[in-house]
């Protein structure tokens, strides 16, 4: 079993496990990780199993397992909610948010880290300082400004909000600081301008952190409720999360809502499962400087 969990480049080697103290510590850490994993996967498993029940079985039966696994209930909920429509709306929101998060935050971080114009340190200090301001405090002035420029009922404010994220700027900037300056100087000697360097040199070298930013932006855009509800409610452009709230308050029973939540969590789970290796690699690159 130790060979299954250990890797050659890990901090614990096979020779270390020959020492009793290290072996005990390894087993304790392994047990703790298994317990944390079980606690993490228990809620979605419970949600999935309960969604097969009808309202009577859900309220009266004490068993976690449903009597039958009838997938037609999911089809009925899908058709009743017209979930395909809100999947499309969420796809628009997520796609625009990812693009804006990468391009706009990346450009600002590129200016601060690579170009370094006068006042760039002040700008970066302001970016860092903005992390201490709770996001909820900006909702009211943000909504007022969006209303004044008549962008209600569109996805543009959601995209621009993702493109003005201080946390993403910090991640990009810390990664850009580690890039080899010789490559950038060589591109400048060849006549490449600043935008060309960003799109042709910096971004191809920044695939690890770009993947991390993209997944953060995806998760944020997909799960965000407050701003999409203020801007998109009753416009026909509601995202999945907004529709879940409307469905719960309208006609949905408790079990129907559980099935709708299952539909809502499927895309992020699939994407994270597919790209988890890249995300972990990107996170490790983002934490290494020098």
Image (tube, rainbow, N blue to C red):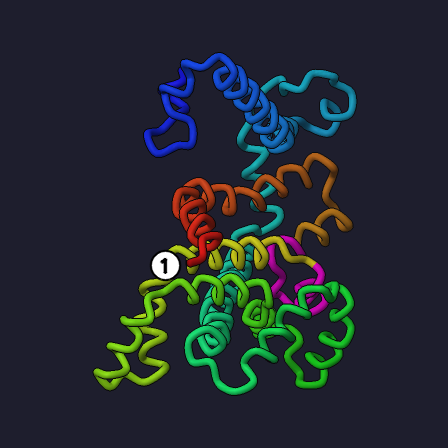
Q: Is residue 154 visible?
A: no
* Mark 1 residue crowding within 10 angstroms, few (<14) / some (14–19) / many (20+): few
Where, by quadrant of the figure, is residue 55 drawn?
top right
Q: Secondary structure at mark 1?
A: helix
Is 38 contained in the magenta span? Answer: no
The range drawn in magenta is 226-242
Residue at the spot 72% in from the left edge and 52% down from the top edge: 245
Image vertical order of residue 258 relative to residue 66, above or below: below
Quarter of the N terminus within the rendering: top left
Residue 155 or residue 36, whichever sits in front: 36
Residue 31: image location, x then y, percent: 56, 20
Residue at the spot 33% in from the left edge and 63% down from the top edge: 205
In this image, 121 relative to 7: left or right? right
Residue 218: image location, x then y, percent: 52, 56
Quarter of the C terminus within the rendering: bottom left
Residue 263: image location, x then y, percent: 56, 43
Residue at the spot 43% in from the left edge and 43% down from the top edge: 276
Where, by quadrant of the figure, is residue 52 drawn?
top right
Residue at the spot 71% in from the left edge and 61% down from the top edge: 226
Residue 90 or residue 273, whichever sits in front: 273
In this image, 142 relative to 240: left or right? right
Residue 223: image location, x then y, percent: 61, 53
Residue, disc 1 = 207
């Amino acid at each position: 079993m130790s060979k299954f969990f250990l890797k050659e480049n890990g901090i614990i080697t096979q020779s270390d496990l020959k020492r009793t103290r290290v072996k005990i510590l390894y087993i304790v850490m392994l047990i703790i990780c298994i317990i944390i994993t079980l606690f993490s996967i228990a809620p979605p498993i419970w949600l999935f199993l309960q969604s097969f029940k009808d309202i009577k079985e859900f309220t009266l039966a004490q068993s976690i397992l449903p009597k039958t696994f009838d997938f037609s209930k999911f089809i009925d909920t899908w058709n009743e909610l017209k979930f395909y429509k809100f999947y499309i709306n969420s796809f628009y929101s997520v796609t625009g948010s990812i693009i804006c998060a990468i391009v706009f935050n990346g450009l600002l971080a590129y200016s601060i880290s690579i170009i370094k114009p006068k006042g760039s340190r002040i700008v970066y200090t302001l970016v860092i300082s903005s992390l201490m301001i709770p996001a909820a405090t900006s909702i009211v002035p943000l909504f007022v400004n969006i209303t004044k420029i008549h962008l209600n009922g569109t996805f543009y404010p959601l995209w621009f909000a993702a493109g003005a994220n201080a946390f993403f700027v910090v991640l990009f900037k810390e990664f850009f600081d580690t890039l080899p300056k010789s490559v950038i100087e060589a591109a400048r000697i060849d006549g490449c301008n600043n935008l060309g360097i960003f799109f042709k040199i910096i971004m191809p070298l920044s695939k690890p952190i770009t993947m991390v930013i993209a997944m953060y932006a995806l998760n944020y855009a997909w799960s965000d409720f407050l701003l999409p509800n203020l801007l998109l409610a009753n416009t026909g452009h509601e995202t999945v999360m907004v529709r879940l709230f409307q469905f719960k308050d309208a006609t949905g029973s408790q079990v129907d809502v559980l099935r709708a939540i299952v539909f809502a969590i499927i895309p992020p789970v699939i994407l994270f499962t597919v790209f988890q290796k890249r995300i972990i690699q990107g996170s490790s690159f983002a934490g290494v400087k020098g």
